[in-house]
Image (cartoon, rainbow, N blue to C red):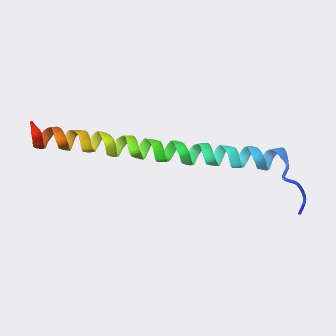
Amino acid sequence: MKPSSLQDILLIVILVIGAIGAILSALAVLAAFGVSLYAAIVG
């Protein structure tokens, strides 16, 4: 195997950051939905 070039490493880093961002945004949406649902039930 040839060593990964800098472009490959940058691509992997960008993909990982994008995946983490997508997961965090999905969690934020779920948290906001849960809070509004809780407020609707309690309030």
Residue farthest along the bottom direction in this orientation: 1
Instruction: Give the side of residue 15 with respect to residue 38, left or right.
Output: right
Quadrant in the picture for residue 3: bottom right
> Considering only vertical position in the picture, is 4 above or below 28?
below
Q: Quadrant of the N terminus?
A: bottom right
Q: Residue at x 16, y 38 (%)?
A: 39
Q: Position of residue 12 (x, y in %)?
A: 70, 49
37 on left or right of 28: left
Tag count: 0
User: Which of the image's four quarters has the C terminus?
Assistant: top left
User: Furthest-front residue in view?
Assistant: 42
Q: Residue furthest left?
A: 43
Q: Indicate the quadrant where residue 34 lies.
A: top left
In terms of depth relative to the viewer, which is nearer, 16 or 11?
16
The residue depicted at 19 percent of the width and 44 percent of the height is: 37
Judged left or right of residue 17, residue 25 is left
Residue 7 as seen in the image, left or right of residue 3: left
- Which residue does the image show at 69% across and 44% down from the upper left? 13
**Residue 31 placed where, x, y %?**
32, 42
